[in-house]
Amino acid sequence: GAVVSQHPSRVICKSGTSVKIECRSLDFQATTMFWYRQFPKKSLMLMATSNEGSKATYEQGVEKDKFLINHASLTLSTLTVTSAHPEDSSFYICSAASDASHYEQYFGPGTRLTVT
Amino acid sequence: QKEVEQNSGPLSVPEGAIASLNCTYSDRGSQSFFWYRQYSGKSPELIMFIYSNGDKEDGRFTAQLNKASQYVSLLIRDSQPSDSATYLCAVVSGGSYIPTFGRGTSLIVHP
Protein backbone atom coordinates (compact mmCIF):
# COMPACT_ATOMS: atom_id res chain seq x y z
CA GLY A 1 0.00 0.00 0.00
CA ALA A 2 0.90 3.65 -0.25
CA VAL A 3 3.01 5.29 2.44
CA VAL A 4 2.04 8.39 4.37
CA SER A 5 4.35 9.94 6.92
CA GLN A 6 3.52 12.31 9.71
CA HIS A 7 5.80 14.48 11.80
CA PRO A 8 6.22 14.82 14.69
CA SER A 9 4.96 11.57 16.18
CA ARG A 10 4.68 13.11 19.62
CA VAL A 11 4.71 16.70 20.80
CA ILE A 12 4.28 18.35 24.16
CA CYS A 13 3.62 22.06 24.20
CA LYS A 14 2.59 24.71 26.67
CA SER A 15 -0.86 26.19 26.74
CA GLY A 16 -1.16 29.17 24.42
CA THR A 17 1.51 28.09 21.98
CA SER A 18 1.03 26.81 18.43
CA VAL A 19 1.99 23.44 17.01
CA LYS A 20 2.45 22.44 13.37
CA ILE A 21 1.96 18.88 12.19
CA GLU A 22 3.16 17.76 8.76
CA CYS A 23 1.64 15.03 6.63
CA ARG A 24 3.40 13.73 3.54
CA SER A 25 2.42 11.17 0.93
CA LEU A 26 5.74 9.54 0.06
CA ASP A 27 5.03 7.49 -3.03
CA PHE A 28 1.90 8.91 -4.63
CA GLN A 29 0.27 12.23 -5.37
CA ALA A 30 -2.52 12.89 -2.92
CA THR A 31 -5.36 14.76 -4.51
CA THR A 32 -7.09 14.95 -1.17
CA MET A 33 -5.86 14.86 2.39
CA PHE A 34 -7.96 14.40 5.49
CA TRP A 35 -7.30 15.37 9.09
CA TYR A 36 -8.83 13.40 11.93
CA ARG A 37 -8.76 13.64 15.69
CA GLN A 38 -9.24 10.69 18.01
CA PHE A 39 -9.67 10.79 21.77
CA PRO A 40 -8.82 7.69 23.84
CA LYS A 41 -11.21 4.81 23.20
CA LYS A 42 -13.32 7.00 20.93
CA SER A 43 -14.10 6.94 17.22
CA LEU A 44 -12.18 8.78 14.54
CA MET A 45 -13.55 12.26 14.08
CA LEU A 46 -13.06 13.95 10.73
CA MET A 47 -11.91 17.52 11.23
CA ALA A 48 -11.38 18.73 7.69
CA THR A 49 -10.77 17.77 4.10
CA SER A 50 -8.28 19.55 1.91
CA ASN A 51 -7.54 19.48 -1.78
CA GLU A 52 -4.24 20.67 -3.18
CA GLY A 53 -4.27 24.38 -3.82
CA SER A 54 -7.72 24.92 -2.32
CA LYS A 55 -9.01 26.02 1.03
CA ALA A 56 -9.84 23.24 3.42
CA THR A 57 -13.42 22.23 4.10
CA TYR A 58 -14.05 21.98 7.82
CA GLU A 59 -16.56 19.74 9.52
CA GLN A 60 -19.26 21.32 11.63
CA GLY A 61 -17.98 22.37 15.03
CA VAL A 62 -14.32 22.53 14.00
CA GLU A 63 -12.90 26.05 14.29
CA LYS A 64 -11.05 26.92 11.12
CA ASP A 65 -9.17 29.77 12.79
CA LYS A 66 -7.88 27.43 15.46
CA PHE A 67 -6.97 24.51 13.23
CA LEU A 68 -5.19 25.96 10.21
CA ILE A 69 -4.78 23.59 7.31
CA ASN A 70 -2.53 24.13 4.34
CA HIS A 71 -2.29 21.76 1.37
CA ALA A 72 0.37 23.45 -0.71
CA SER A 73 1.39 20.51 -2.87
CA LEU A 74 0.20 17.08 -3.91
CA THR A 75 2.44 15.48 -1.32
CA LEU A 76 2.26 17.80 1.69
CA SER A 77 -0.43 19.06 4.01
CA THR A 78 0.04 20.76 7.36
CA LEU A 79 -2.21 21.23 10.35
CA THR A 80 -1.41 24.03 12.77
CA VAL A 81 -3.10 24.02 16.15
CA THR A 82 -3.06 27.65 17.21
CA SER A 83 -3.18 28.82 20.82
CA ALA A 84 -3.37 25.27 22.03
CA HIS A 85 -5.18 24.42 25.26
CA PRO A 86 -5.20 21.23 27.33
CA GLU A 87 -8.54 20.19 25.79
CA ASP A 88 -6.78 20.07 22.39
CA SER A 89 -4.66 17.21 23.66
CA SER A 90 -5.49 14.30 21.38
CA PHE A 91 -4.25 11.92 18.69
CA TYR A 92 -4.21 13.72 15.34
CA ILE A 93 -4.13 11.54 12.25
CA CYS A 94 -3.86 12.53 8.62
CA SER A 95 -4.75 10.44 5.61
CA ALA A 96 -4.20 10.82 1.91
CA ALA A 97 -6.24 9.70 -1.08
CA SER A 98 -5.96 9.95 -4.82
CA ASP A 99 -8.60 10.51 -7.47
CA ALA A 100 -6.58 8.14 -9.64
CA SER A 101 -8.04 5.27 -7.64
CA HIS A 102 -11.25 4.79 -5.70
CA TYR A 103 -10.26 7.18 -2.94
CA GLU A 104 -9.05 4.55 -0.59
CA GLN A 105 -7.35 6.41 2.24
CA TYR A 106 -3.89 5.72 3.51
CA PHE A 107 -3.29 6.93 7.02
CA GLY A 108 -0.22 8.47 8.53
CA PRO A 109 1.05 7.07 11.84
CA GLY A 110 -0.52 9.89 13.84
CA THR A 111 0.72 12.66 16.13
CA ARG A 112 0.06 12.54 19.83
CA LEU A 113 -0.33 16.10 21.11
CA THR A 114 -0.18 16.90 24.79
CA VAL A 115 -0.83 20.46 25.89
CA THR A 116 0.29 21.26 29.41
CA GLN B 1 -27.66 11.53 6.98
CA LYS B 2 -25.37 8.75 5.79
CA GLU B 3 -24.90 6.10 8.43
CA VAL B 4 -22.55 3.17 8.78
CA GLU B 5 -23.36 0.75 11.55
CA GLN B 6 -21.10 -1.77 13.22
CA ASN B 7 -21.54 -3.81 16.36
CA SER B 8 -19.01 -2.41 18.82
CA GLY B 9 -18.31 -5.85 20.30
CA PRO B 10 -16.06 -7.09 21.61
CA LEU B 11 -16.21 -10.09 19.36
CA SER B 12 -14.22 -12.86 20.98
CA VAL B 13 -13.06 -15.87 18.95
CA PRO B 14 -10.57 -18.64 19.67
CA GLU B 15 -7.30 -18.83 17.81
CA GLY B 16 -7.72 -20.63 14.49
CA ALA B 17 -11.42 -19.82 14.15
CA ILE B 18 -13.11 -17.64 11.55
CA ALA B 19 -13.95 -14.14 12.72
CA SER B 20 -16.92 -12.52 11.00
CA LEU B 21 -17.27 -8.75 11.16
CA ASN B 22 -20.35 -7.02 9.81
CA CYS B 23 -21.26 -3.56 8.62
CA THR B 24 -24.48 -2.06 7.28
CA TYR B 25 -24.88 1.26 5.54
CA SER B 26 -27.82 3.52 4.83
CA ASP B 27 -26.94 5.19 1.52
CA ARG B 28 -27.98 3.06 -1.46
CA GLY B 29 -25.74 5.21 -3.66
CA SER B 30 -22.63 3.95 -1.89
CA GLN B 31 -20.00 2.67 -4.27
CA SER B 32 -16.75 2.01 -2.44
CA PHE B 33 -16.29 0.02 0.73
CA PHE B 34 -13.21 -0.28 2.90
CA TRP B 35 -12.05 -2.21 5.91
CA TYR B 36 -9.38 -0.77 8.19
CA ARG B 37 -7.64 -2.33 11.14
CA GLN B 38 -6.62 -0.16 14.08
CA TYR B 39 -4.45 -1.39 16.90
CA SER B 40 -4.75 0.39 20.22
CA GLY B 41 -2.78 3.65 20.16
CA LYS B 42 -2.04 3.38 16.45
CA SER B 43 -3.56 4.82 13.30
CA PRO B 44 -5.86 2.82 10.99
CA GLU B 45 -4.38 0.57 8.34
CA LEU B 46 -6.21 -0.28 5.11
CA ILE B 47 -6.61 -4.04 4.79
CA MET B 48 -9.33 -4.55 2.17
CA PHE B 49 -11.46 -2.63 -0.29
CA ILE B 50 -14.33 -3.84 -2.44
CA TYR B 51 -16.48 -2.16 -5.07
CA SER B 52 -18.52 -4.96 -6.68
CA ASN B 53 -21.09 -7.35 -5.30
CA GLY B 54 -19.68 -10.66 -4.22
CA ASP B 55 -16.54 -11.81 -2.49
CA LYS B 56 -13.00 -10.56 -2.64
CA GLU B 57 -10.24 -12.60 -1.08
CA ASP B 58 -6.77 -11.51 -0.01
CA GLY B 59 -4.83 -14.04 2.01
CA ARG B 60 -6.73 -14.83 5.20
CA PHE B 61 -9.16 -11.96 4.59
CA THR B 62 -12.38 -12.07 2.57
CA ALA B 63 -14.60 -9.06 2.05
CA GLN B 64 -18.20 -9.71 1.06
CA LEU B 65 -20.48 -7.08 -0.42
CA ASN B 66 -24.23 -7.27 -0.91
CA LYS B 67 -25.52 -3.97 -2.24
CA ALA B 68 -29.15 -5.11 -2.32
CA SER B 69 -29.01 -5.75 1.43
CA GLN B 70 -26.66 -2.78 2.04
CA TYR B 71 -24.30 -5.04 3.86
CA VAL B 72 -20.55 -5.55 3.80
CA SER B 73 -18.63 -8.04 5.88
CA LEU B 74 -15.07 -9.07 6.60
CA LEU B 75 -14.11 -12.66 7.29
CA ILE B 76 -10.77 -13.47 8.88
CA ARG B 77 -9.79 -17.12 8.54
CA ASP B 78 -7.41 -18.87 10.90
CA SER B 79 -7.62 -15.97 13.34
CA GLN B 80 -4.45 -15.18 15.26
CA PRO B 81 -3.96 -13.26 18.52
CA SER B 82 -2.18 -10.62 16.41
CA ASP B 83 -5.51 -9.98 14.66
CA SER B 84 -6.88 -8.57 17.92
CA ALA B 85 -7.72 -4.96 17.07
CA THR B 86 -10.60 -2.67 16.20
CA TYR B 87 -11.91 -3.08 12.67
CA LEU B 88 -13.39 -0.03 11.00
CA CYS B 89 -15.79 -0.14 8.07
CA ALA B 90 -15.80 2.89 5.77
CA VAL B 91 -18.16 3.70 2.92
CA VAL B 92 -17.87 6.25 0.12
CA SER B 93 -20.97 7.32 -1.75
CA GLY B 94 -21.15 8.03 -5.44
CA GLY B 95 -20.30 11.64 -6.23
CA SER B 96 -18.31 12.05 -3.03
CA TYR B 97 -14.83 11.19 -1.96
CA ILE B 98 -15.39 11.66 1.74
CA PRO B 99 -15.85 8.38 3.57
CA THR B 100 -18.26 7.71 6.38
CA PHE B 101 -16.71 5.52 9.05
CA GLY B 102 -18.46 3.13 11.36
CA ARG B 103 -17.58 3.21 15.05
CA GLY B 104 -15.60 -0.01 14.72
CA THR B 105 -15.83 -3.54 16.07
CA SER B 106 -13.34 -4.71 18.67
CA LEU B 107 -12.02 -8.20 17.91
CA ILE B 108 -10.29 -10.32 20.52
CA VAL B 109 -8.61 -13.54 19.43
CA HIS B 110 -7.73 -15.63 22.46
CA PRO B 111 -5.15 -18.44 22.44
Image (cartoon, grey):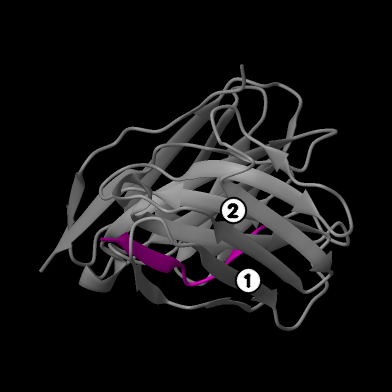
Residue B109 in picture, x, y percent from top left: 19, 61
Residue drawn at x 34%, y 57% as measured from the top left: A15
Cα–Cα span, label 2 and label 1: 9 Å
Q: What residue is shown with label 1? A: A23
Q: Residues within 10 Å of mark 2 (few under 14, many from 20)?
A: many
Residue B97 in picture, x, y percent from top left: 77, 43
Name the residue nearer the viewer: A67 or B74.
A67
What residue range appears in magenta? A105-116
Mark 2, secondary structure of its residue: strand
**Tally of numbered tags:** 2
Residue B96 in picture, x, y percent from top left: 80, 36
Image quadrant where residue A60 sits? top right
Name the quadrant of the N terminus of chain A.
bottom right
Image quadrant where residue A47 sits? top right
Subunit under mark 2: A
Q: Are marks 2 and 1 on the same chain?
A: yes
Q: What residue is shown with label 2? A: A35
Subunit under mark 1: A
Residue A96 is labelled as none
Q: Is residue B106 above or below residue B66?
A: below
Image quadrant where residue A26 sits? bottom right
- The amino acid pointed to by label 2 is Trp
Name the residue nearer the viewer: A46 or A11.
A11
Query: Is residue A85 visible in the rendered structure shown here?
Result: yes
Name the residue nearer the viewer: A93 or A87.
A87
Question: In the figure, is residue A101 to the left or right of A1?
Answer: right
